[in-house]
Image (cartoon, rainbow, N blue to C red):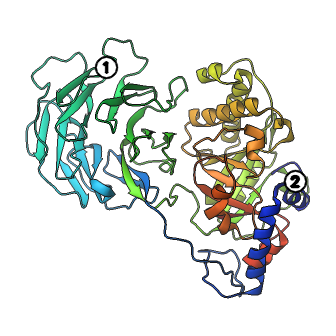
């Protein structure tokens, strides 16, 4: 994306990266697109230029339901991801007390929010069964859990007091017990005949048919426990700490954690996938991390009006709602080669997508501020990643990685790039991308894995919610082996009609980053004709 001017590197990349099988597919798509054959037409929502050209393609199959998630903020705002429906929120409405958590109704048909006074707010098919909103509580409510049939729920207070509504039965509480640390959350058993409470020191209190499988109550923790979730087997649970450390007990499996990875903001909540084989964490700024079979569907906007306090599993259609660009919009990515003071040219207006190179390690884009001004409100930023090593960094995880020196290098260069962007006076709190294509990475799969993960850690440490990967689908696995980070993916130079890539690149190429395809870069002359005349001398981009 930066090694040569766009007009030259387009030809080289497309010859080198498109497989023979893909070429036959592309030829058919190009033929249909340019001839105006019969069929259903996926119409881009906002092309940059007008044209009478019509691109025709088969109607895609209806999306299958996927495990997705909602998040709630303390002002009652709700954020929906993975196609989970937005069913309403308390955002922008006056609250007596802040929202502290949320729970999901069966089949993702609704959700509840709960405030610290026990006030309940019901949305969609989540019925209201009662609340403590009008009661004088000894301690504030800190969380809630719903029964599996959605016909009841429990509220838990920081002293472990339990309030049961609907078909949720009361099995006991710590309301009259002196606790070493306050209760921070609860989880019900699968048959609704019991529940666990967890305190901030990781102490577990089991009631009803909930079994005790272990706790951290007698351990010295780096950070307090903030939430828990039950396994699907009725015989285990997870606890997550504010630093993203995870503790798995009973039949709850360990799928990964953020323990040892430096965090700029505390983790506040976790949710488990529908099949129980993965989980998500969110910090208080809505940055989501996915583990196991949990798919990353996006994080909240970078700047929030109130902190995120909870995440809960939902059911969606798999659409990606975490992009900074509307689906169907167009634009460009640019680098130092488009620097006007160096003889380059900026792409023409209008454009929605505008992704600007900050630097390659050791070399700051000399036109960064000017190009950021060209980008306007559509600004995203990227770093060109190359091979290197450093003896140390602020990322303790690097010491356990396959290549500590490469990991340290990635972390340090990412943090440096973020600081350089701020020093240049531009808005650095936007989505960032790591351009993984340099020839220096070839033949160093273990090093490149560690380098890229260190870079992700560095940008997350800088406080960024969205960090994605730009790479060729045909070259990614050659560079990183079996490494598949759960982050957004920007597909480089693949396909003639880019929206087909949005739908099928994951099925055609194994081993890609597991997050949704958010952007597709294209630049072939045939694509220029099919899409209505975008300037082929620049790297063109399409938002999925």
Q: Is residue 23 above or below residue 426?
A: below
Quadrant of the rendered image containing residue 354: bottom right
Of residues 250 and 45, which is closer to you in this image? Answer: 250
Q: Measuring 19% from the left and 50% from the top, which residue is drawn there?
A: 120
Q: Answer yes or no: do the residues labelled 1 and 2 have beta carbons within 8 Å?
A: no
Instruction: From the viewer's perspective, tell me whether residue 427 is left or right of residue 332.
Output: left
Residue 501 picture location, percent across and down = 67, 63
The residue carrying mark 2 is: 341
Residue 457 picture location, percent across and down = 61, 33
Q: Residues within 10 Å of mark 1 (few under 14, many from 20)?
A: some
Quadrant of the rendered image containing residue 401: top right
The mark found on residue 145 in the picture is none
Instruction: From the viewer's perspective, tell me whether residue 460 is left or right of residue 188.
Output: right
Q: Is residue 97 above or below residue 327?
A: above
Q: Measuring 26% from the left and 53% from the top, which residue is drawn there?
A: 105
Q: Nearer the viewer, mark 1 or mark 2?
A: 1
Local SS, label 2: helix
Q: Measuring 45% from the left and 41% from the top, which residue is drawn there?
A: 285
Residue 454 picture location, percent across and down = 66, 31
Which quadrant is home to the C terminus?
bottom right
Instruction: From the viewer's perspective, tell me whether residue 196 is left or right of residue 177.
Output: right
Q: Is residue 117 visible?
A: no
Labels 1 and 2: the sequence-earlier one:
1
Residue 180 picture location, percent across and down = 23, 15
Q: Measuring 7% from the left and 41% from the top, which residue is drawn there?
A: 135
Q: Is residue 370 visible?
A: yes
The mark found on residue 214 in the picture is 1
Q: Is residue 209 above or below residue 42?
A: above
Q: Residues within 10 Å of mark 2 (few under 14, many from 20)?
A: few
Instruction: From the viewer's perspective, tell me whether residue 240 is left or right of residue 426.
Output: left
Local SS, label 1: loop
């Amino acid at each position: 994306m930066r090694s040569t001017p766009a007009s030259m590197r387009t030809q080289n990349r497309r010859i080198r990266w498109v497989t023979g099988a893909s070429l036959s597919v592309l030829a058919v798509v190009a033929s249909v697109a340019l001839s105006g054959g019969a069929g259903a037409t996926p119409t881009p929502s906002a092309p940059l230029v007008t044209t009478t050209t019509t691109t025709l393609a088969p109607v895609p199959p209806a999306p299958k339901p996927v495990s997705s998630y909602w998040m709630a903020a303390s002002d009652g705002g709700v954020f929906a991801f993975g196609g989970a429906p937005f069913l309403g929120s308390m955002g922008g409405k006056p609250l007596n007390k802040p929202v502290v958590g949320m729970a999901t109704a069966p089949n993702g048909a609704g959700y509840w929010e709960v405030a610290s006074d026990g006030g309940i707010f019901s949305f969609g098919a989540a019925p209201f069964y009662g609340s403590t909103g009008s009661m004088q509580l000894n301690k504030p409510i800190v969380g809630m859990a719903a029964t599996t049939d959605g016909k009841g729920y429990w509220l838990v207070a920081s002293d472990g007091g339990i309030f049961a509504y609907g078909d949720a039965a009361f099995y006991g509480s710590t309301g009259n017990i002196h606790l070493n640390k306050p209760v921070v959350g609860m989880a019900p058993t699968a048959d609704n005949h019991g529940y666990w409470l967890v305190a901030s020191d990781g102490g577990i209190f089991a009631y009803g048919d909930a079994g005790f499988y272990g706790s951290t109550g007698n351990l010295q923790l780096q950070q307090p426990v903030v939430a828990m979730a039950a396994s699907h087997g009725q015989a285990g649970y997870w606890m997550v700490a504010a630093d993203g450390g995870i503790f798995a007990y009973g039949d709850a499996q360990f799928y990964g954690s953020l323990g040892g990875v430096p965090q700029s903001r505390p983790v506040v909540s976790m949710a488990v996938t529908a099949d129980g084989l993965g989980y998500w964490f969110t910090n208080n700024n809505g940055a989501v991390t996915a583990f196991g079979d949990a798919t990353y569907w996006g994080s909240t906007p970078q700047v929030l009006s109130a902190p995120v306090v909870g995440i809960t599993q939902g059911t969606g259609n798999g659409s990606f709602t975490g992009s900074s660009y509307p689906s169907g919009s167009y634009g460009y990515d640019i680098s130092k080669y488009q620097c006007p003071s160096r003889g380059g040219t900026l792409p023409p207006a209008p454009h929605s997508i505008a992704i600007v190179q900050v630097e390659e390690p050791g070399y700051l884009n000399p036109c960064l501020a000017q190009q950021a001004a060209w980008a306007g409100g559509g600004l995203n930023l990227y770093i060109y990643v190359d091979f290197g090593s450093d003896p140390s960094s602020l990322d303790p995880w690097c010491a356990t990685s396959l290549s500590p020196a490469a990991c340290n290098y990635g972390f340090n260069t990412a943090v440096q790039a973020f600081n350089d962007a701020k020093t240049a006076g531009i808005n650095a709190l936007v989505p960032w991308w790591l351009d993984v294509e340099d020839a220096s990475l070839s033949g160093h799969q273990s090093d490149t894995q560690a380098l890229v993960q260190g870079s992700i850690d560095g940008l997350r440490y800088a406080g960024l919610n969205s960090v994605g990967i730009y790479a060729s689908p045909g070259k990614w696995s050659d560079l990183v082996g079996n490494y598949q980070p759960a982050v957004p993916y920007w597909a480089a130079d693949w396909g003639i009609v880019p929206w087909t890539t949005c739908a099928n690149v994951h099925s055609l190429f194994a081993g890609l980053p597991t997050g949704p395809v958010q952007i597709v870069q294209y630049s072939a002359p045939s694509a220029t004709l099919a899409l209505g005349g975008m300037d082929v001398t620049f790297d063109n981009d399409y938002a999925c």
